[in-house]
Image (tube, coloured by chain):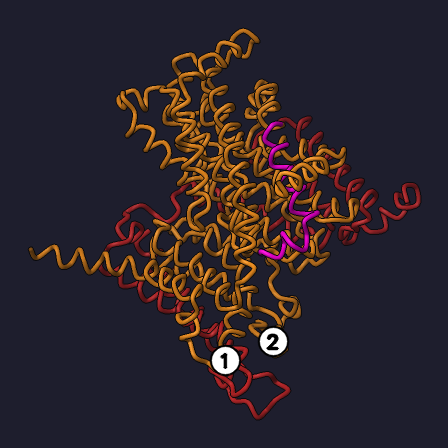
Chain colours: A red, B orange
Amino acid sequence: MRRAELITAIILGILSLALMWKAGEAPSWNPDIARFDNIGMIDGEGPGSGFWPFWLSFAMFGSCVWICINWVRGTSAPSQSEEPFLDEYGQRTLITVGGGLIGFLLVIYVLGFYGAIPLFLIYYMRFLGRHSWFATACVAGGMTVFCFFFFDIAMRIVLPKGVLEPLFIPLYDIFL
Amino acid sequence: MDVLLSLYGGILIALEPINLGLAIVGVIVGLFVGAMPGLGSVNGVAILLPFTFIIQSFTGGATSPMIFLASIYYGAMYGGAISSITLGIPGASTAVATTFDGRPMALAGKAHVALVAAAIASFIGGTFSNVMFTAFAPALASVALSFGDPEVFALMLLAFATFVGLGGDDIPKTIFSICVGLVLATVGFDIISGEPRLIFFDITGFSHGIRFLVLAIGVYGIGEMLWTINTSRYGTTMTKVDVSFASIFEAIKEFRFAWRGTMIGSAMGFFVGILPAAGATPGSLMSYGVAKLTSKDPDKFGKGEINGIAAPEAANNSASTGAMLPMMTLGIPGSPTTAVLLAGMVIWGLQPGPLLFTNQPDFVWPLIGSFYIANVIAVLVNLAFIPVFLWMLRMPFTILSPMIFILSLVGTYAAYLDMFDVSLMVIVGFAAFFLRILDYPVAPAVLAIVLGPIAEPKLRQSLLFSDGDFSIFFTRPIAGPITVVALILIFLPLLKFIKDKLKKPA
């Protein structure tokens, strides 16, 4: 946990500096404005467009420096902790649950929601939760059918279907 | 008298079939999310916010969607006690204090007494705060009508300063959390100059700004769920509850011993709930502490004392309405859940703040009316369906959690029909999970994301008005004292540090 605290503060500090750099960006359509011209007061206009995000990012950077100082002094709880950032269970959870979630998101781009939802539920319930095939099939099928009729048919909110799109055309013909 | 007439009219609208139905559904959903360990009112409200667009498309106004979400909020406050008592795990952080005496009472075979005491105390706390809200809100709103840009910005500064000075979390991490929320709210086009800001890698998805829903669902739908799965790794045993008619009647009779705790919780909860950094969790913990401190027999607390259940339960319900007061009258939310509700109001086309009471009475009064209705529904549903909620609590997390993930992704897509938002929401969820492990508080960031788009124009307009002179925040009669208090709160930790350093050598 100690190392993670410091590494995170450094990463967030670098991110804050990047945000400061980005906040000072002048609009591409006006070559007369130099970088960081927008972070102060502009005559007759008050604070420039970069004023608020720049100084907030500066405060973020300052906070990260403060976190690092606390780390050196050992005053924050994570900087004193000898526990791992993620123990074995946590790592497994991140890989199985978090990985499954990312997989779910990626599959949506290919198979759409109605292909991804049952696959995600089968993965989660059957392989992570060790539920019976019957229960898994009921929930996976039920949830997919419910989502289709609720969103696509009742609410007319068309969810992405990816390569499965042609399969839904007959359903639209019947229900819409 | 005007207030009573407005309230009467509001209650009549809240009792219309569609609003009543939404209140009942909202309360049931709230009871469920409140009861499920790892889920709380904020998760329920954030995940279901996209679905309120559907309600709005049917009803045409913002009143019904708001009644639905407010009922979830209300129900969740009741539901938290169910798992605190029967499982020994708080359903939500607001019910942590309920476990102190609720669990020992359940283990002593009196779970039914604890559940009934929690329900009745919640009802009394909710009713007390509803009356206080009705009395104070219109008056506060009319005072706030005289506020200009510097006053509104000073109030927002005060809201953030309360997190720093009184929040109790790591201070630099709290400041970081506030600032990151405010910075993320600036992504997109500057509303004053029209210049693009922080459009990372020229990705067009950022040009419309990072939507509040993406951040709220990412934090509360994905991040919190991952955190809960990671932390709730040990098996639990559910205590048996005698839910016969006779036992419930006996439990109601025993409530006569819980009056003191209920009164303390009701009063403290409301006033603590109003404070921006506080809300229902500190309200319930403080009420528990005061009930114990002022008790004739404090040794009984922690061993199944009925006042130890009544005080935090009355307080968390009272605080939930208390947190609505600054949200409705000043446009400044008092808790993460009210921050989500405030964002919902903006999305539905309302402008939260004092003008709401003048310009939108047909929204405000039915909503206040629905607080009373939802409170009655919640206590009745809670008492009548205790066995159902106990059954639902047995639902394995390996069924509930994937459903929440699916709802989060589908809900985010359905709100804006943009897969970029869905991907961003998942990334935000993972970031929130990692930051949560390292004790970075997420509530200030959520509040900042909501208040950012309001705070920045107020600051810039104030400075434009004063020709860049920051003294405008100190010289005006209302803004001045608020800014000074905010600065004191911000520097309070530093003052404490210096005081401790000076004390040490002596």
Q: Nearer the viewer, residue A103 or B491?
A: B491
Q: Is residue B403 visible?
A: no
Please check the rendered image and state whether residue B369 is part of the magenta-colored stretch, yes or no.
yes
Instruction: Please identify the quarter of the rendering in which residue B371 is found.
Output: top right
Circle 1 residue: A24
The answer to which image quadrant residue B18 occupies is top right
The mark total stands at 2
Q: On the same chain: label 2 and label 1?
A: no
Q: Secondary structure at mark 2?
A: loop
Q: Which residue is mark 2?
A: B192
Mark 2 to mark 1: distance in Å? 16 Å
Q: Chain of mark 2?
A: B
The amino acid on which the numbered mark 1 sits, given as a three-letter code, is Gly
Looking at the rendered image, the quarter that the C terminus of chain B falls into is bottom left
Which span of residues is magenta-colored?
Answer: B353-376
Does B498 appear above or below A29?
A: above
Residue at point 44% right, 60% down?
Answer: B178
Side of A131 relative to A4 (left or right): right
Q: Is residue B327 left or right of residue A59?
A: right
**Relative height, residue A112 to residue B487 (above, below):** above
